[in-house]
Image: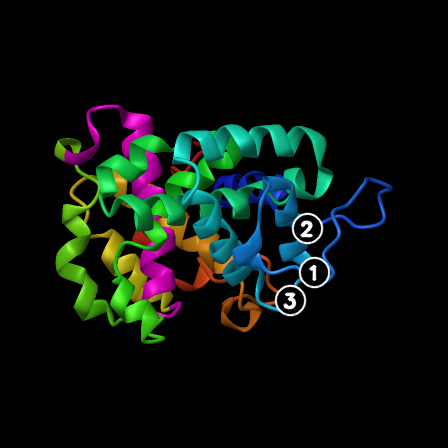
Amino acid sequence: MKKLLLSILLLLLPGGASLHGTGEQRPSCAGWKPANIKVFEELECCFGHPEKSQECLDASMKALSEKEDVKNLLTLFREARSEHETIENNCHVIAHAVGRASFVKTKNLGQAFHACDMSCHAGCYHGVLETLFLTEEQRRQGIDHLSYEQIAPRIPEVCTKALLGEKKSVLAQCQHGLGHAILYTIAYDIPNALRGCDLLPTRYGQESCYIGVFTENVIAEEKEKRNLKEDDVFYPCNAIEARSQLPSATVR
Protein backbone atom coordinates (compact mmCIF):
# COMPACT_ATOMS: atom_id res chain seq x y z
CA MET A 1 0.00 0.00 0.00
CA LYS A 2 2.80 2.42 0.89
CA LYS A 3 4.50 1.67 -2.44
CA LEU A 4 1.25 2.46 -4.27
CA LEU A 5 0.94 5.81 -2.50
CA LEU A 6 4.59 6.56 -3.28
CA SER A 7 4.05 5.82 -6.97
CA ILE A 8 1.06 8.18 -7.07
CA LEU A 9 2.95 10.95 -5.26
CA LEU A 10 5.94 10.63 -7.57
CA LEU A 11 3.62 10.84 -10.57
CA LEU A 12 1.99 14.01 -9.29
CA LEU A 13 4.98 16.01 -8.02
CA PRO A 14 5.90 17.96 -11.17
CA GLY A 15 2.43 18.60 -12.53
CA GLY A 16 0.24 19.90 -9.78
CA ALA A 17 0.48 23.54 -8.86
CA SER A 18 0.88 26.53 -11.07
CA LEU A 19 3.51 29.00 -9.79
CA HIS A 20 2.83 32.71 -9.70
CA GLY A 21 4.96 35.57 -8.51
CA THR A 22 8.23 33.88 -9.47
CA GLY A 23 9.49 36.84 -11.44
CA GLU A 24 9.33 35.08 -14.79
CA GLN A 25 8.08 36.98 -17.84
CA ARG A 26 4.45 35.99 -18.31
CA PRO A 27 2.32 36.43 -21.47
CA SER A 28 -0.42 39.04 -21.42
CA CYS A 29 -3.71 37.24 -20.76
CA ALA A 30 -6.00 40.27 -20.86
CA GLY A 31 -8.81 39.48 -23.30
CA TRP A 32 -7.08 36.26 -24.29
CA LYS A 33 -9.18 33.39 -25.65
CA PRO A 34 -8.00 29.76 -25.94
CA ALA A 35 -9.15 29.44 -29.57
CA ASN A 36 -6.89 32.39 -30.50
CA ILE A 37 -3.70 30.84 -29.14
CA LYS A 38 -0.65 31.33 -31.37
CA VAL A 39 2.29 30.01 -29.34
CA PHE A 40 2.63 27.31 -26.70
CA GLU A 41 3.72 29.77 -24.01
CA GLU A 42 0.20 31.22 -23.95
CA LEU A 43 -1.01 28.03 -22.23
CA GLU A 44 0.04 29.76 -19.02
CA CYS A 45 -3.13 31.81 -19.37
CA CYS A 46 -5.26 28.70 -18.86
CA PHE A 47 -4.26 28.51 -15.20
CA GLY A 48 -5.79 31.87 -14.42
CA HIS A 49 -8.61 31.72 -16.95
CA PRO A 50 -12.31 32.03 -15.98
CA GLU A 51 -13.01 28.75 -17.79
CA LYS A 52 -12.01 25.49 -16.13
CA SER A 53 -8.35 24.86 -16.86
CA GLN A 54 -9.08 21.55 -18.63
CA GLU A 55 -11.63 23.15 -20.95
CA CYS A 56 -9.18 25.97 -21.63
CA LEU A 57 -6.33 23.56 -22.35
CA ASP A 58 -8.52 21.48 -24.67
CA ALA A 59 -9.67 24.52 -26.66
CA SER A 60 -6.09 25.79 -26.89
CA MET A 61 -4.70 22.42 -27.92
CA LYS A 62 -7.41 22.00 -30.56
CA ALA A 63 -6.35 25.31 -32.08
CA LEU A 64 -2.65 24.41 -31.96
CA SER A 65 -3.22 20.90 -33.36
CA GLU A 66 -4.91 22.38 -36.42
CA LYS A 67 -1.54 23.95 -37.27
CA GLU A 68 0.88 21.27 -36.02
CA ASP A 69 0.97 17.49 -35.83
CA VAL A 70 1.29 15.89 -32.40
CA LYS A 71 5.03 15.20 -32.62
CA ASN A 72 5.67 18.86 -33.43
CA LEU A 73 3.37 19.88 -30.58
CA LEU A 74 5.45 17.81 -28.18
CA THR A 75 8.64 19.45 -29.48
CA LEU A 76 7.13 22.91 -28.93
CA PHE A 77 5.96 21.75 -25.51
CA ARG A 78 9.50 20.71 -24.50
CA GLU A 79 10.85 24.10 -25.60
CA ALA A 80 8.17 25.97 -23.64
CA ARG A 81 8.79 23.85 -20.54
CA SER A 82 12.49 24.74 -20.57
CA GLU A 83 11.73 28.47 -20.62
CA HIS A 84 8.50 28.86 -18.61
CA GLU A 85 8.20 27.66 -15.05
CA THR A 86 4.41 27.60 -14.97
CA ILE A 87 4.29 25.27 -17.97
CA GLU A 88 6.95 22.99 -16.47
CA ASN A 89 5.09 22.78 -13.17
CA ASN A 90 1.84 21.89 -14.96
CA CYS A 91 3.47 19.62 -17.52
CA HIS A 92 1.46 16.47 -16.72
CA VAL A 93 -1.97 18.08 -17.13
CA ILE A 94 -0.83 19.87 -20.30
CA ALA A 95 0.50 16.58 -21.68
CA HIS A 96 -2.93 15.04 -20.99
CA ALA A 97 -4.44 17.78 -23.17
CA VAL A 98 -1.93 17.03 -25.96
CA GLY A 99 -3.04 13.39 -25.84
CA ARG A 100 -6.72 14.29 -25.96
CA ALA A 101 -6.06 16.50 -28.99
CA SER A 102 -4.10 13.67 -30.62
CA PHE A 103 -7.02 11.24 -30.42
CA VAL A 104 -9.61 13.82 -31.51
CA LYS A 105 -7.46 14.69 -34.53
CA THR A 106 -6.55 11.17 -35.65
CA LYS A 107 -9.67 9.30 -34.46
CA ASN A 108 -7.37 6.28 -34.27
CA LEU A 109 -6.17 4.96 -30.91
CA GLY A 110 -3.01 3.28 -32.21
CA GLN A 111 -1.95 6.27 -34.31
CA ALA A 112 -2.67 8.74 -31.52
CA PHE A 113 -0.89 6.61 -28.93
CA HIS A 114 2.26 6.15 -31.01
CA ALA A 115 2.49 9.91 -31.59
CA CYS A 116 2.99 10.40 -27.84
CA ASP A 117 6.15 10.05 -25.75
CA MET A 118 7.01 9.42 -22.10
CA SER A 119 7.59 13.07 -21.15
CA CYS A 120 5.78 14.54 -18.14
CA HIS A 121 5.12 11.09 -16.66
CA ALA A 122 3.57 9.87 -19.92
CA GLY A 123 0.72 12.36 -19.68
CA CYS A 124 0.14 12.34 -23.45
CA TYR A 125 -0.57 8.59 -23.41
CA HIS A 126 -3.03 9.06 -20.57
CA GLY A 127 -4.82 11.90 -22.34
CA VAL A 128 -5.40 9.78 -25.45
CA LEU A 129 -7.34 7.29 -23.36
CA GLU A 130 -9.44 9.98 -21.64
CA THR A 131 -11.29 10.70 -24.87
CA LEU A 132 -11.75 7.08 -25.85
CA PHE A 133 -15.24 6.24 -24.65
CA LEU A 134 -17.12 9.46 -25.44
CA THR A 135 -17.87 10.34 -29.06
CA GLU A 136 -17.54 13.88 -30.39
CA GLU A 137 -21.33 13.99 -30.78
CA GLN A 138 -21.82 13.06 -27.13
CA ARG A 139 -19.34 15.73 -26.04
CA ARG A 140 -21.15 18.33 -28.18
CA GLN A 141 -24.38 17.32 -26.45
CA GLY A 142 -22.76 17.98 -23.08
CA ILE A 143 -22.59 14.29 -22.13
CA ASP A 144 -19.59 13.92 -19.83
CA HIS A 145 -20.15 10.47 -18.35
CA LEU A 146 -21.44 7.02 -19.28
CA SER A 147 -22.46 4.02 -17.19
CA TYR A 148 -20.18 1.11 -16.39
CA GLU A 149 -22.45 -1.18 -18.42
CA GLN A 150 -22.07 1.07 -21.48
CA ILE A 151 -18.28 0.90 -21.56
CA ALA A 152 -17.50 -2.54 -20.07
CA PRO A 153 -17.63 -4.47 -23.38
CA ARG A 154 -15.02 -2.15 -24.91
CA ILE A 155 -12.47 -2.27 -22.08
CA PRO A 156 -10.70 -5.55 -23.05
CA GLU A 157 -10.37 -4.35 -26.67
CA VAL A 158 -8.33 -1.22 -25.93
CA CYS A 159 -4.77 -1.96 -24.77
CA THR A 160 -3.91 -4.91 -26.99
CA LYS A 161 -0.64 -5.99 -28.59
CA ALA A 162 -2.40 -6.08 -31.95
CA LEU A 163 -3.13 -2.37 -31.64
CA LEU A 164 -0.05 -1.08 -29.82
CA GLY A 165 2.72 -3.61 -30.44
CA GLU A 166 4.73 -5.79 -28.08
CA LYS A 167 6.58 -3.16 -26.04
CA LYS A 168 5.66 -3.72 -22.41
CA SER A 169 6.19 -0.11 -21.30
CA VAL A 170 3.78 1.18 -23.97
CA LEU A 171 1.15 -1.41 -23.03
CA ALA A 172 1.55 -0.48 -19.35
CA GLN A 173 1.02 3.21 -20.11
CA CYS A 174 -2.10 2.32 -22.07
CA GLN A 175 -3.42 0.23 -19.17
CA HIS A 176 -2.63 2.99 -16.69
CA GLY A 177 -4.29 5.62 -18.88
CA LEU A 178 -7.26 3.31 -19.24
CA GLY A 179 -7.72 3.43 -15.47
CA HIS A 180 -7.88 7.24 -15.66
CA ALA A 181 -10.37 7.02 -18.51
CA ILE A 182 -12.66 4.46 -16.88
CA LEU A 183 -12.96 6.37 -13.60
CA TYR A 184 -13.60 9.69 -15.36
CA THR A 185 -16.10 8.20 -17.79
CA ILE A 186 -18.24 6.51 -15.13
CA ALA A 187 -18.35 9.62 -12.94
CA TYR A 188 -15.72 8.61 -10.37
CA ASP A 189 -17.39 5.39 -9.26
CA ILE A 190 -14.27 3.69 -7.84
CA PRO A 191 -15.68 0.17 -7.19
CA ASN A 192 -17.01 -0.14 -10.73
CA ALA A 193 -13.84 1.39 -12.19
CA LEU A 194 -11.81 -1.33 -10.48
CA ARG A 195 -14.26 -3.91 -11.86
CA GLY A 196 -13.48 -2.47 -15.27
CA CYS A 197 -9.75 -2.99 -14.70
CA ASP A 198 -10.45 -6.61 -13.78
CA LEU A 199 -11.69 -7.15 -17.34
CA LEU A 200 -8.10 -6.88 -18.59
CA PRO A 201 -6.57 -10.29 -19.28
CA THR A 202 -3.35 -10.08 -17.22
CA ARG A 203 -2.65 -9.28 -13.57
CA TYR A 204 0.06 -6.81 -14.59
CA GLY A 205 -2.42 -4.99 -16.81
CA GLN A 206 -5.04 -4.96 -14.06
CA GLU A 207 -2.57 -3.45 -11.58
CA SER A 208 -1.45 -0.79 -14.06
CA CYS A 209 -5.11 0.07 -14.56
CA TYR A 210 -5.78 0.18 -10.80
CA ILE A 211 -2.99 2.74 -10.37
CA GLY A 212 -4.60 4.86 -13.09
CA VAL A 213 -7.92 4.72 -11.23
CA PHE A 214 -6.37 5.78 -7.92
CA THR A 215 -4.33 8.54 -9.57
CA GLU A 216 -7.36 9.97 -11.38
CA ASN A 217 -9.20 9.99 -8.05
CA VAL A 218 -6.45 12.23 -6.63
CA ILE A 219 -6.12 14.65 -9.55
CA ALA A 220 -9.77 15.02 -10.66
CA GLU A 221 -10.21 18.62 -11.79
CA GLU A 222 -13.62 18.84 -10.09
CA LYS A 223 -12.34 18.52 -6.54
CA GLU A 224 -15.73 17.55 -5.15
CA LYS A 225 -15.47 14.30 -7.10
CA ARG A 226 -12.25 13.26 -5.37
CA ASN A 227 -13.08 10.40 -3.03
CA LEU A 228 -10.63 11.27 -0.23
CA LYS A 229 -10.62 11.82 3.53
CA GLU A 230 -8.53 14.49 5.24
CA ASP A 231 -8.15 12.37 8.37
CA ASP A 232 -7.20 9.13 6.56
CA VAL A 233 -4.28 9.34 4.13
CA PHE A 234 -4.77 5.70 3.05
CA TYR A 235 -8.43 6.15 2.01
CA PRO A 236 -9.89 4.86 -0.35
CA CYS A 237 -7.15 2.23 -0.69
CA ASN A 238 -8.08 0.76 2.70
CA ALA A 239 -11.79 0.61 1.86
CA ILE A 240 -11.70 -1.54 -1.27
CA GLU A 241 -11.50 -5.26 -1.93
CA ALA A 242 -8.15 -6.82 -1.08
CA ARG A 243 -7.66 -7.82 -4.73
CA SER A 244 -7.33 -4.16 -5.73
CA GLN A 245 -4.99 -3.08 -2.92
CA LEU A 246 -1.85 -3.82 -4.93
CA PRO A 247 0.48 -5.36 -2.32
CA SER A 248 3.02 -5.94 -5.09
CA ALA A 249 2.75 -2.45 -6.66
CA THR A 250 5.99 -0.63 -7.35
CA VAL A 251 6.93 2.61 -9.07
CA ARG A 252 6.63 1.78 -12.76
| Rendered image: mark on residue 48 | 1
Query: Of the residues tagged 1 and 2, which is closer to the observer?
Result: 1
The residue range painted magenta reads 163-188
Q: Is residue 99 visible?
A: yes
| Mark 3 lies on residue | 231
Q: Which mark is residue 221?
A: none
Magenta-colored segment: predominant secondary structure: helix
Which residue is denoted by mark 2 in the rendering? 17
Secondary structure, mark 1, is helix
**Point 17% across, 61% down: residue:** 152
- Relative image position of residue 89 (x, y in whole percent): 66, 42
Residue 204 seen anywhere in this rendered image of the structure = no
Among numbered discs 1 and 2, the one appearing first in the sequence: 2
Under circle 3, the secondary element is loop
> Relative to residue 118, is residue 127 depicted above or below?
below
Marks 1 and 2 in Cβ contact (< 8 Å):
no
The picture places residue 159, in percent across and down from the top left corner, at: 22, 41
Is residue 98 a member of the stretch shown in magenta?
A: no
Q: Is residue 131 left or right of residue 55?
A: left
